[in-house]
């Protein structure tokens, strides 16, 4: 089986696996314990915090370890709910941001529209920020479905000018593109399993007065209760060190797209006019004779693990909110597929995917 679903989760890297195993043997104590064994664990956490802060460009004390980006985003939005005014969030945010906003801002939220190319409307945001009060803004760094990069730097500058804090969900950016500069944001979230670290660990860059989402002990300077996952943290840092030193290339993705346009022109590329993650290709497949014959199922039978942003329009699931925001119909959104490669994906893998797509189109369209 060839794996093209790295935006959902990246296989654990050998470096991260070894770091996790080493940590479980070396650091047996609780970082909150007062003895020397606990102190060693605490020092390891602090060293990891310093490394991550160095990549992001922020102070180590601004980093809080979490169970992942979902917890981090929920923490940030719960904290922002204590401020007066609305929450402005992009119409293409990850469900963990959207659902958290519904919980903490049930009657005071607005969506920032996106263009047909999948990019947030900065002009709309600039105008909305002048009609306050605004409690906060949520703009992701890169979209998980289309791979389209968002102008988070420009959005952050607008928020700074208006004196409004901003949350940037960087789960799809970190570990694929350089983390430098992200630390300028008020709240920045990320998780390990998107780039080869283990599932169940992540971080939130946040102010020191951030209120904890979880009640309990005083860990993480009172911003996140619960014993820290030290092996997970060290495995995440080891994986990120690998990615930060690697040079990403979109050459194979671009070659795949070029051949796709030539050999299967009935497949439509999404976000074609926008900068996108080097590993992501999102498309609309042709209408199928039988909608129940899911494209993702057909490709799975052909030996490829890919993902779809929504079920067919005739199914029970709602169409992708990302594609809906971009102006696509429910029927069109029901034909969306996402191919997301990893650091170890080869040119042969991309070529084989193209061949499989040709077979799938011949049989279903």
Image (cartoon, rainbow, N blue to C red):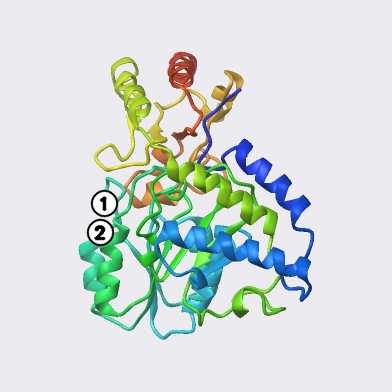
Camera-side residue of 49 and 361: 49
Most extreme residue toward the front is 36
Q: Residue at x 54, y 23 (%)?
A: 299
**First along the sequence among labels 2 and 1:** 1
User: Which mark is drawn over residue 213?
Assistant: none
* Image quarter (top left, top right, bottom left or bottom right) of the N terminus: top right
Q: CA distance from mark 2 to mark 1?
A: 6 Å
Side of 111 relative to 49 (left or right): left
Residue 181, percent from left and from top: 35, 59
Q: Residue 67: percent from the left, percent from the top?
A: 63, 60
Viewer-side residue, 143 vs 109: 143
Judging by the rendered image, the residue that carries numbered circle 2 is 121
Image quarter of the C terminus = top left
Q: Is residue 291 above or below residue 245?
A: above
Q: Count numbered badges in the picture.
A: 2
Residue 117 shows in this picture: yes
Front position in the image: 165 or 20: 20
Q: How far from the left and from the top, in percent, is residue 363?
A: 49, 14
Circle 1 residue: 115
Quarter assignment of residue 89? bottom left
Q: Secondary structure at mark 1?
A: loop
Badge 2 vs badge 1, beta-carbon distance below 8 Å:
yes
């Amino acid at each position: 089986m060839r794996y093209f679903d790295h935006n959902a989760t990246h296989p654990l890297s050998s470096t991260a696996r070894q770091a996790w195993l080493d940590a479980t043997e070396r650091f047996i104590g609780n970082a909150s314990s007062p003895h020397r064994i606990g102190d060693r664990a605490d020092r390891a956490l602090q060293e990891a915090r310093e490394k991550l802060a160095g990549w992001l460009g922020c102070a180590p004390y601004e980093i809080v370890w979490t169970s992942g980006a979902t917890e981090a985003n929920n923490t940030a939005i719960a904290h922002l709910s204590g401020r007066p005014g609305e929450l402005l969030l992009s119409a293409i945010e990850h469900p963990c941001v959207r659902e958290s906003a519904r919980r903490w801002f049930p009657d005071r939220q607005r969506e920032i529209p996106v263009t047909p190319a999948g990019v947030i409307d900065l002009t709309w945001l600039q105008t909305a920020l002048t009609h306050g009060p605004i409690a906060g803004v949520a703009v992701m760094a890169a979209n998980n479905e289309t791979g389209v990069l968002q102008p988070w730097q420009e959005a952050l500058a607008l928020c700074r000018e208006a004196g409004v804090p901003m949350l940037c969900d960087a789960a799809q950016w970190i570990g694929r593109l350089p983390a430098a500069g992200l630390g300028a944001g008020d709240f920045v979230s990320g998780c390990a399993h998107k780039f080869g670290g283990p599932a169940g660990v992540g971080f939130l860059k946040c102010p020191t007065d951030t209120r904890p989402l979880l009640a309990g002990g005083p860990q993480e300077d009172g911003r996140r209760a619960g014993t820290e996952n030290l092996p997970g943290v060290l495995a995440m840092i080891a994986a990120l060190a690998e990615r930060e030193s690697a040079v990403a290339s979109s050459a194979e993705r671009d070659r795949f797209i070029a051949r796709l346009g030539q050999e299967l022109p009935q497949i439509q590329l999404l976000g074609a006019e926008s900068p996108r993650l080097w590993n992501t290709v999102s498309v609309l497949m042709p209408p199928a004779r039988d909608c129940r014959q899911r494209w993702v199922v057909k490709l799975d039978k052909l030996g490829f693990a890919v993902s779809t942003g929504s079920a067919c329009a005739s199914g029970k699931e709602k169409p992708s909110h990302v594609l809906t925001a971009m102006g696509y119909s429910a029927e069109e959104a029901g034909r969306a597929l996402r191919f997301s490669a990893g650091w170890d994906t080869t040119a042969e893998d991309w070529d084989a995917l193209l061949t499989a797509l040709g077979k799938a189109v011949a049989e279903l369209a």
